[in-house]
Image (spheres, grey):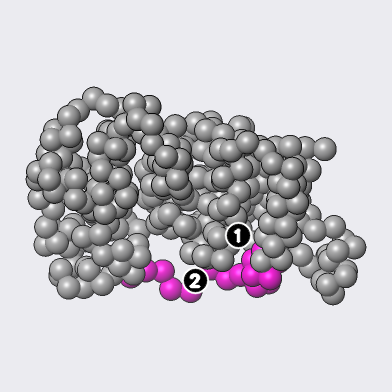
Amino acid sequence: MALVTHGDQKYQNSVKLAAANDWPGLSIEHRKFEAGRQATPVPICTELVMLLSGGGMVCRTGNGEVQKSLARPGMSYLVPVGTQESHLELSDRMECLHLYLPPALLDHSALADFGIDPAKVEIAYAHGLADQVLFHICSPLRDLLYRPRQPTDALFVKGIQVALAAHLLGNYTIDRWRAPDKLPSLDPRRLQRVLDYIEASLGSDIRLEDLAAQACLSPYHFSRLFREATGLSPHRYVTDRRVQAARHELAHDRLSLVEIALEFGFGSQANFTRVFRKAASLTPGQYRELCCGQADVKADRADTVFRRDCA
């Protein structure tokens, strides 16, 4: 029997790009979100959300606990079955993979076989998890949504389910996971002011001194605290945002390459091509052709990823 999920009810401010729900203990959705608030129904199964691209502030409240984090690709969020969420808001566009799991990750007999007391197994309402093991366990499931089914897929999914359940039970039950004691020193309010400034200034010359002024810090301290809060240097973050904005514009095929280069602060088409190729392993022209279906390019791994970006 397919797992009953709540994604369509909860994520009304999103586009569901692909989904698979024909496995008994797992359902998968690939969604793109616009900034804004989401609905907060009580989840009828346990949900794991992994950020694939985009990023920004995620503000949510569940079971009376307020959580704020700067989401970036590779991060994960857990929403256990029955969580009383009252607020969920995204500051920017994001693309996410959603995995829906049964209320009981493993049946009681399996838990007993490993000496785990089923009465003490409760998954935590955890946020901003920079857990590469978790991400690498789950990310292969995305490919199942974009290729023909194979006879061994059921076995493949079952193996991932077991590995995922073991990792969650070993690290993210309520008695094992604790929210970080110390939040980044660059508090969410000042950080959001900096991020808003970057978004509004992508076509301009963004100087470190200007960003530091938005946070009321010296450039030296701002650079350190920004990296602590986001995992990226200010220069790398600005470059990534410019590339993401350019990718979005290329997919819509409205402006020329030189116009996009100037619109998003690359300075020249030559510099745009150099930076974009380094980030995306494709030139801007190749990326546009893939998105607009104008080229017959080999379906290698990068090709598959960027076709999904344009969906």
Q: Residue 160: x percent and y percent?
A: 68, 56
Asked whether residue 71 is drawn in magenta, I would say no
Q: Residue at x 37, y 50 (%)?
A: 56
Magenta residues, start to end: 168-187
Amino acid beneath label 1? Ile
Q: Residue at x 73, y 47 (%)?
A: 152
Q: Name the quadrant containing residue 112.
A: bottom right
Q: Nearer the viewer, residue 16 or 228?
A: 16
Q: Which residue is mark 1?
A: 137
Q: Nearer the viewer, residue 19 or 45?
A: 19
Residue 267 shows up from this direction: yes
Left or right, 261 with reference to 305: left
Q: Which residue is mark 2?
A: 180
| Real-space Cα separation, disc 1 to disc 2, in angstroms | 23 Å
Tag count: 2
Q: Is residue 154 positioned above or below 165 on the image?
A: above
Which quadrant: the C terminus? top left
Residue 291 shows up from this direction: no
